[in-house]
Image: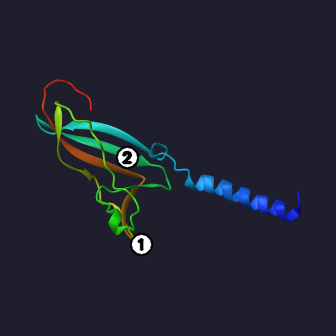
Amino acid sequence: MQAPLKSLFLVFFSFLLWSTNAFAQPSWKDKMTLDLTLTKVTECQSLMTIKAKVVPGFHVFSVSHDPEKADFTGTPTTIEVEPSKNYKLLGKLYESKKPTVHKDEFGTSLYFENSVDFLQKVEVLTDKVFSM
């Protein structure tokens, strides 16, 4: 292969490797672990706690993060709970602590590093044992 063609091939091949790695999005499951507990508060109310542990170098956005205020980046954390006749959710998901607020020329981001507990009040509608 001629030298100019060889150089062009190496540049193209390097770009191909970079673009493959740059656009391959890892799953959040590789960057975070979740642990759910349900704690009885009263006879008919419980508190669902979802402990999120985030690997160093990554973060999870707050439930109150607003992508419109952050140049349309980031997605607020949501937790989907299957509907059931055994319980109903009370109020909104909230966090155990205040998020880190990051402001730059693109806007304001709200997120957590390392760990955070997401909390959800639950009304228990049965006296039978059930799982969530």
Residue shown at 35% from the left, 63% from the top: 67
Kindly identify the amino acid type of the residue bearing the numbered disc 1. Phe
User: Where does residue 115 sit, x and y in percent of width and height?
Assistant: 39, 51
Specify the farthest residue to the top. Answer: 128
Do the numbered discs 2 and 1 sit on residues whose CB atoms are within 8 Å?
no
Q: Which mark is residue 52?
A: 2
For the C terminus, give its image quadrant: top left
Q: Earlier in the sequence, mark 2 or mark 1?
A: 2
Seen from the viewer's position, the closer of residues 48 and 41 is 48
Specify the farthest residue to the right. Answer: 2
Residue 13 relative to residue 111: left or right: right
Specify the farthest residue to the left. Answer: 43
Give the vertical position of 21 relative to 123 (above or below).
below
Q: Identify the image quadrant of residue 75.
A: bottom left
Residue shown at 68% from the left, 59% from the top: 15
Query: Of tags 2 and 1, which is closer to the observer?
Result: 1
User: Where does residue 38 sit, x and y in percent of width and height?
Assistant: 25, 36
User: Where does residue 78 sit, x and y in percent of width and height?
Assistant: 31, 49
Give the vertical position of 5 relative to 78 (above or below).
below
Q: Which residue is mark 1?
A: 106
Q: Which mark is residue 60?
A: none
Looking at the rendered structure, the secondary structure element under dot 1 is loop
Q: How many marks?
A: 2
For the N terminus, give its image quadrant: bottom right
Residue shown at 22% from the left, 35% from the top: 83
Residue shown at 42% from the left, 75% from the top: 105
Residue 125 relative to residue 95: left or right: left
Give the vertical position of 117 relative to 66 (above or below).
above
User: Where does residue 4 sit, x and y in percent of width and height?
Assistant: 84, 65
Kindly identify the amino acid type of the residue bearing the numbered disc 2. Ala
> Distance of mark 2 from mark 1, alpha carbons?
27 Å
